[in-house]
Image (cartoon, rainbow, N blue to C red):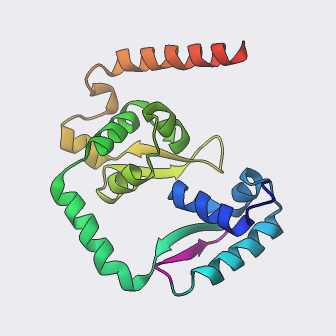
Amino acid sequence: MDAGIPLSKRIEAVLFVHGEPMGIPRLAEFLDAGKTEVRDALVELDNRLIGGALRLVYSGDEVQLACREYLESDITELVSSEHARGLSRAGAETLAVVAYRSPICKKDIDYIRGVNSAFALRSLAIRGLISRRTSDTDRRTTVYEPTLDFLKFIGVSRREELPEYAEFQKKTKEFIQSQNTSQEV
């Protein structure tokens, strides 16, 4: 834990960059703090955000940064303009990763792309091209998958019909295994 930076500011940065709901236990583990400390820091952060454009939104034991309601028209306009423009390069890259590697978590998408994919994932989810769910193997992890609407839109019945899908699966599996092997050495 970095003693020089208040926990509330560290939480704010993590929630901002993560861009999705995050469980208090996961925040505590990630920031090497107790759950009670995290809850207290969230109260501090919530108080600091009063009067600003952002607020904390809670759902059970999860928390997320969100815009204030009075900014909804600006955000709606932004989302509408994003839909009208078509997919950005980042959106297309992210969608390809999700389509070919799902179910896949954000951390792995970021690793494959080499950049933070939070905004692209949000945009794709808003468009209905990807969905998110809790991982079957780790309840603390969210994974992304292409939606049926995405498959209908591109004209395939299942992901396996995507161009060069089998070859891509083989090569990415080999790459990941080679990375795991090189990290063990």
Residue 166 is one of the magenta-drawn residues? no
- Name above or below for residue 22 compared with residue 150: below
The overriding secondary structure of the stretch rendered in magenta is strand
Write the start and end of the magenta stretch as one range: 52-61
**Residue 11 placement, left or right of 110:** right
Q: Nearer the viewer, residue 104 or 31?
A: 31
Q: Image quadrant for the C terminus?
A: top right
Task: Residue 100: give x, y in percent of width and height.
Answer: 38, 30
Q: Nearer the viewer, residue 151 or 10?
A: 10
Q: Is residue 131 visible?
A: yes
Residue occupying image coordinates x 45% and y 36%? 102
Give the total number of marks visible in the rendering.
0
The quarter of the picture where residue 97 lies is top left
Q: Is residue 21 visible?
A: no
**Residue 72 placement, left or right of 144:** left
Q: Nearer the viewer, residue 15 or 101?
A: 15
The quarter of the picture where residue 145 lies is top left
Residue occupying image coordinates x 27% and y 45%? 150
Task: Residue 94: give x, y in percent of width and height.
Answer: 37, 40
- Name above or below for residue 27 compared with residue 120: below
**Residue 80 placement, left or right of 124:** left
**Residue 68 placement, left or right of 30:** left
Residue occupying image coordinates x 65% and y 13%? 181
Task: Residue 52: give x, y in percent of width and height.
Answer: 50, 82
Task: Residue 64: give x, y in percent of width and height.
Answer: 56, 67
Residue occupying image coordinates x 58% and y 45%? 135
